[in-house]
Image: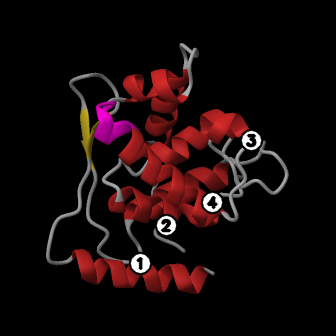
């Protein structure tokens, strides 16, 4: 699985070499925007940063850091966003219904995915198509739809996004 992920990352880096893949999504306040970098090698700092953060929480999602980054770039999302949702909803995949791969509280936690990769893909795609493309372009706007009536969901997602960035970078796979 790890070898397949590395090959996919290398292939993806060749595909994006001709153009810029970036995501502007307000994350901290209405005026704050985060711009992601290109994936230009299998040692992309975002993958390593996210992997280290998830490992620090003993998350079963740690080895899927590359999937989070690839899907974020594919759907023009902040690379920390879906992983941060998993922190809020399931303590990074540690508290989920058995074999559901549902770390995101998807369908109030009742939805069962076939794998972590599938869950990351479906949730990322849905956030782009059913939330952001329909006008919910900030985390607070998404929170009103994703997790009503919670008044803390959005701030908790932002909290985890900031924490992910605070992890010391190590370039190991």
The residue lying toward the viewer, choosing from 16 and 36, is 16
Q: Secondary structure at mark 4?
A: helix
- Circle 4 or circle 3, nearest the eye: 3
Q: Is residue 151 above or below residue 24?
A: above
Q: Which mark is residue 82?
A: none
Residue at the extreme right of the image, as rendered = 98
Q: Which residue is mark 4?
A: 62
Q: Which residue is mark 3?
A: 110
- Circle 1 or circle 3, nearest the eye: 3
Q: Which mark is residue 9?
A: 1
Task: Write down the region rendered in magenta.
Answer: 131-137
Q: Is residue 77 above or below residue 163?
A: below
Instruction: Name the residue: 24% across, 29% down.
Output: 32
Position of residue 87 in the picture relative to residue 42 (left or right): right
Mark 1 or mark 2: name the one nearer the start of the chain. 1
Q: Examine the rendering and report whether any part of residue 105 can be seen.
A: no
Position of residue 34 in the picture relative to residue 82 (left or right): left
Cα–Cα span, label 1 and label 3: 31 Å
Badge 3: how crowded within 10 Å, few (<14), some, or many (20+)? few
> Where does residue 106 sit, x and y in percent of width and height?
63, 41
Q: Secondary structure at mark 1?
A: helix
Q: Which mark is residue 66?
A: 2
- Circle 1 or circle 4, nearest the eye: 1
Mark 2 or mark 3: name the one nearer the start of the chain. 2
- Circle 2 or circle 3, nearest the eye: 3
Instruction: Name the residue: 35% across, 62% down.
Output: 74
Instruction: Name the residue: 61% across, 52% down.
Output: 54
Cα–Cα span, label 1 and label 4: 16 Å
Q: Examine the rendering and report whether any part of residue 23 can be seen.
A: yes
Asked if the residues shown at circle 1 and circle 2 are in contact, with their CB atoms under 8 angstroms apart, the answer is: yes
Residue at the extreme left of the image, as rendered = 18
Badge 1: how crowded within 10 Å, few (<14), some, or many (20+)? many
């Amino acid at each position: 699985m790890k070898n397949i992920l590395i090959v996919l990352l290398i292939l993806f880096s060749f595909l994006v070499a001709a153009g810029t893949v970036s995501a502007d999504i307000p994350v901290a306040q209405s005026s704050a925007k985060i711009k992601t970098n290109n994936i230009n090698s299998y040692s992309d700092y975002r993958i390593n940063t996210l992997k280290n953060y998830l490992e620090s929480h003993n998350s079963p999602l740690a080895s899927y850091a590359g999937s989070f980054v690839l899907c974020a770039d594919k759907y023009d999302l902040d690379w920390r966003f879906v992983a941060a949702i998993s922190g809020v909803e399931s303590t990074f995949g540690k508290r989920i219904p058995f074999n559901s791969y549902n770390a995101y509280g998807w369908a109030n936690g009742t939805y069962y995915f076939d794998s972590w990769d599938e869950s990351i893909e479906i949730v990322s795609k849905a956030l782009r198509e059913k939330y952001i493309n329909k006008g919910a372009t900030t985390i607070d706007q998404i929170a009103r739809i994703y997790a009503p009536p919670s008044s803390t969901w959005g701030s908790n997602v932002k909290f985890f996004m900031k924490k992910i960035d605070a992890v010391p970078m190590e370039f190991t796979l």
